[in-house]
Amino acid sequence: MRATAPLVRLSMHFGVRTAFDKGQATGPFVCGRDKAGAGYQPKFCGDAFDVKNLVHMKPYRDAFEWSAYGYHVGCNNLGEYPFPMDPVYYPNAIWYSLPGICPGELFYDKDANNCQASRPGGYCPGIEPTGNGTCTWNYEPAGEIDLNELVGIQDYDTWRYSGHREYDPELDKGIKFSWWNGINSTTANAERVKQAKELFDQKYPDSASVDSMAPPVCDFNFGQFYKEWYRKDGYSGPCGKASATCLGQIKWIKTEGLLKHPGWYTPLTTDASESDIQRLLYQQGKGGCLRPC
């Protein structure tokens, strides 16, 4: 995988982890901003992205998460945003999301409305990912292990009808079976993960070991990723020409600020126009700037 340039400018390799149901991305998707005391905070709506929300999301014409950062690989450390945010009993567990073609469509609608051209996703098979927004990841099969194989069940139906049960949540143990006993025990879970690793290495001795293929650190930062939604709307409110003070700040940002401190001015880049910078300063409440008309 390779991070897109907008993520790299914020010192991140991963964006928000997106859930997928039946092949369709179901969020989280920002859909505007809410008042929060004297300021603002991002607002999230529904499940699958709804284009009706774009009226509150200028200048974006599609889901912010992909419009601003490309079809990035997402991640979240379990126990942190977006889900689950309850205690997790597998230390250092991480979920990743990998947007493929037409990520906003159900798996049987991937040919709808020419979406493969307009929303290609980030999968780019056969080449090293470039991070250009539509080429952020690929994969190659490494092998697989079966859960029954791991826990020692050879014929599940025969095993089940002979009085076994994998796990009873009221007892916190199995019946005539112990592999899942203590399901919320971090010690027991570490042992279960260890056994899974050992089985994979045993089954594929010519492949790299599981431990040598450690998952990448999840460096997603919610505050940085959704930074612009903590600012006021840049497309409503009083508009006018930039004052002398405002022009001075625009000039400094244009010539120095965007080069030295790109993270301060998300989502602007070094090719931002003076109008773009004025609008951002208005959103930040700096320089006495009005929004550009």
Image (cartoon, rainbow, N blue to C red):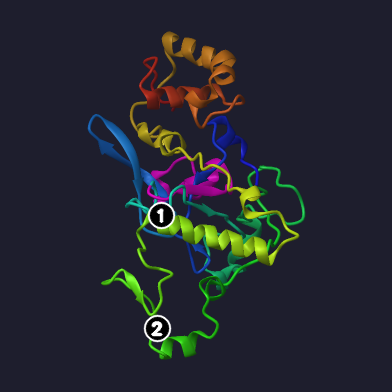
Picture coordinates of residue 61, whole percent (x, y): 51, 47
Q: Earlier in the sequence, mark 2 or mark 1?
A: 2
Q: Quick one: label 2, few (<14), some, or many (20+) residues within 10 Å? A: some
Q: Quadrant of the C terminus?
A: top left
Q: Quadrant of residue 221?
A: top left
- Indicate the secondary structure of the residue bearing disc 1: helix
State the residue at coordinates (60%, 65%).
199
Q: Which residue is at the front of the view, 191 or 128?
A: 191
Q: Which residue is at the front of the view, 227 or 84?
A: 84
Q: Quadrant of residue 58?
A: top left
Picture coordinates of residue 235, whole percent (x, y): 40, 34
State the residue at coordinates (41%, 25%).
291
The residue labelled by disc 1 is: 187
| Residue 164: mark | 2
Picture coordinates of residue 254, whole percent (x, y): 56, 17
Task: Look at the image and tell me whether residue 270 can be seen.
Answer: yes
- Indicate the secondary structure of the residue bearing disc 2: loop
Q: Say whether residue 133 is left or right of residue 19.
A: right
